[in-house]
Image: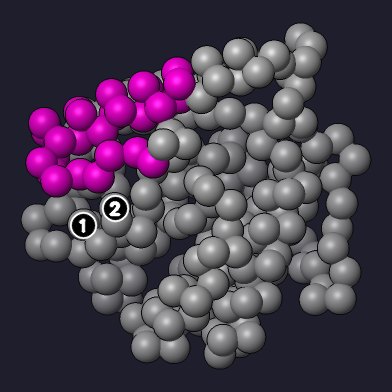
Amino acid sequence: MTQQTSSRSRAARLALLIAVSALVLTSACGGAESSDDGVASVDDAPSTSESKDGPDTAGGAAQGKSAFYDAQMKYVQCMRKNVEKDFPGPKLSGYLDWSKIDQLQQKPGNEEISKGGKDGVCTKDMLDAAKLEPRRDTQKEYESMLAHAKCMRSHGVSKFTNPQLRDGNVLPGGDANPASPEVSQDSPTYKQAREACKGKLLDGLDGMQ
């Protein structure tokens, strides 16, 4: 595995840590893959506008997004201070720009970025931000990743797998065997497909598959 491929894999793992539970990560092996002709559905998908305690008001939703952004900014500031002064700031939505982080990781000496800095100095800030991530519509998240996977295959990355739905969570697609990669992320075809298909992913899902 090349340094560039390894860096991409580390970036993807960090994005997964923010976006899905540890249970999902430990159960990611196996399972049936959705076909190109059908879209699975989630009956118990969490709503983006309603919490377990009741519906959000517009003000509450805005306040939640602001808290998420502020928490991400705290993580970014920690990374800039301790790891890389050019670490990119979050988008207005609060989500990190994983394409920029991925590029930054590829520079010599930036290997610690994927670990939250040396000895995980910024990991707590990253996890605190994760707790404030706005609720997602699981069905829309899945459909976004499915559209992205189809797009990647249509642009020549034939072994790019579909995401899966399991226990109300979305398992990202991509390389079916990360331990022995079957998808070359260094190839011109992959890079061109990634660029062409990035618009298929909802904000915050870049880097997940």
Is residue 193 shown above or below 189? above
Q: Is residue 174 left or right of residue 31?
A: left
> What residue is rendered at 63% in x and 86% in y?
154
Is residue 131 shown above or below 104? above
Is residue 124 shown above or below 26? above
Tag on residue 130? none
Q: Which of 64 and 14 is in front in this view?
A: 64
Q: Position of residue 204 (x, y in %)?
A: 51, 46
Give the magenta range: 66-91
Q: Is 135 contained in the magenta span?
A: no
Q: Is the magenta stretch mostly helix, strand or loop?
A: helix
Q: Position of residue 31 (x, y in %)?
A: 76, 61
> What residue is rendered at 62% in x and 77% in y?
151
Q: How many labels does the image show?
A: 2
Is residue 129 shown above or below 15? above
The kind of secondary structure element at disc 2 is helix
Residue 123 appears anywhere in the view = yes
Q: Where is residue 168 in the image (x, y as percent from the top left)?
A: 78, 41
Q: How many C-alpha atoms fall within 10 Å of the one at disc 2: few (<14), some, or many (≥20)?
A: many
> Amino acid under label 1?
Leu
For disc 2, the marked residue is 101
Q: Which of 134 and 130 is in front in this view?
A: 134
For disc 1, the marked residue is 104
Q: Are marks 1 and 2 in contact (CB under 8 Å)?
A: yes
Q: In this view, does 112 lie to the left or right of 159?
A: left
> What residue is rendered at 10% in x and 62% in y?
108
Q: Position of residue 172 (x, y in %)?
A: 61, 57
The kind of secondary structure element at disc 1 is helix
User: Among all residues in the image, which is located at the extreme top?
Assistant: 53
Q: Is 77 contained in the magenta span?
A: yes
Q: Is residue 47 left or right of residue 161?
A: right
> Amino acid under label 2?
Ile
